[in-house]
Image: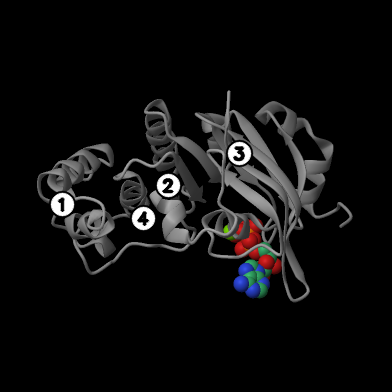
Amino acid sequence: MSEILSVSKLNKSFGGVTVARDIDFALQAGTMHCLIGPNGAGKSSFFRLILGEHAPDSGTISFRETDITRMRSFERIRRGISVKFQVPGIFKALSVRQNLEVAFQHHLHGHNLATTVRRVLEFTNLESEVETAAGVLSHGQQQWLEIGMAVGVEPQLLLLDEPTAGMSPDETRKTGEMLHELNGRGITILAVEHDMAFVEQIATRVTVLHFGAIFAEGTIAEIIDHPGVQEIYLGTADE
Ligand SMILES: Nc1ncnc2c1ncn2[C@@H]1O[C@H](COP(=O)(O)OP(=O)(O)OP(=O)(O)O)[C@@H](O)[C@H]1O
Ligand SMILES: [Mg+2]
């Protein structure tokens, strides 16, 4: 297996808050990998560093064997990184179709755009809601729309920040199936997630962040059994 993303000695602080502390991280191409950790551990900040929305203080980030550490965000996206952030990124007043068209307009035109919109509507199960304003969709449907917006122009690497937050168990399971389908098409997935049943459904490997540093990494079984991981969630581990 080859590494699609590798991060070496990555550091980032905002004033007194360290969000990345000597992070060494390798993501194998073709896998589904979860990133977990308590609130404020630095998970979302790590995504912003990978995407180039934050500049690291030191360290390097490589994507498909190219050093992207100083590349602009749009250039990283052009090379195949896509992201669904924790904060909602849909336009609530626009219809489902308009949201998809806005997401793909810089990459696709005419026939290709129409074909991709149709394919994504089918994938997200939103065919019957195509003219519905995104803001009146159910919470789960809004999350699926946003995943669809992130994968219409097929990325190599998909970053998902808490894709199942606020979903029912049924919606969460459905989301896991959607991610398996994307992964089956060759998309590597790195997801921040709190729901361990969901982590179990999708992830081959799990990395635990704590105070901006990698605290543990392993298979889901290894992470569940790890006594230190249980402690940091209960807030009893030392900094
Ligand atoms: N731009 C910023 N300026 C200052 N501090 C920041 C900035 N971004 C994040 N932080 C701080 O860095 C820490 C890590 O935040 P981050 O959002 O990465 O955590 P997280 O692991 O995603 O948490 P959550 O599970 O709550 O989403 C927090 O203490 C946060 O307040
Ligand atoms: Mg976060």
Taking 84 as reference, is 35 above or below it? above
Number of marks in the rendered image = 4
- Marks 4/1 in contact by CB < 8 Å: the verdict is no
Query: In the visual, does 74 lie left or right of 211?
Result: left
- Tell me the mark number nearer the camera, choosing from 3 and 1: 1
SS state under label 2: loop
How far separated are the C-alphas under marks 2 and 1?
Answer: 19 Å
State whether label 4 is within 8 Å of ligand 1: no
Q: Amino acid at mark 3?
A: Met
Q: Earlier in the sequence, mark 2 or mark 1?
A: 2
Q: Earlier in the sequence, mark 4 or mark 2?
A: 2
Residue at image mark 2? 79
- Tell me the mark number nearer the camera, choosing from 4 and 2: 2
Residue at image mark 4? 139
Residue at horizontal 50%, vertical 29%? 30
Residue at horizontal 53%, vertical 30%? 31
Bin the neighbour count of mark 4 within 10 Å (Cα to Cα): few under 14, some 14-19, many 20 and up. Answer: some
Bin the neighbour count of mark 2 within 10 Å (Cα to Cα): few under 14, some 14-19, many 20 and up. Answer: some
Taking 30 as reference, is 68 above or below it? below
**What's the image's color scheme?**
one colour
Q: Residue furthest left?
A: 111
> In the image, which disc is placed on residue 196?
3
Which quarter of the rendered picture does the C terminus lie within? bottom right
Percent of width and height locating residue 14:
70, 72
Query: In the visual, does 82 lie left or right of 33?
Result: left
Query: In the visual, does 163 lie left or right of 45?
Result: left
How far separated are the C-alphas under marks 4 and 3?
Answer: 20 Å
Specify the quarter for ligand 1: bottom right
Percent of width and height locating residue 155:
39, 42
Q: Residue furthest top?
A: 1
Bin the neighbour count of mark 3 within 10 Å (Cα to Cα): few under 14, some 14-19, many 20 and up. Answer: some
How far separated are the C-alphas under marks 4 and 2?
Answer: 30 Å
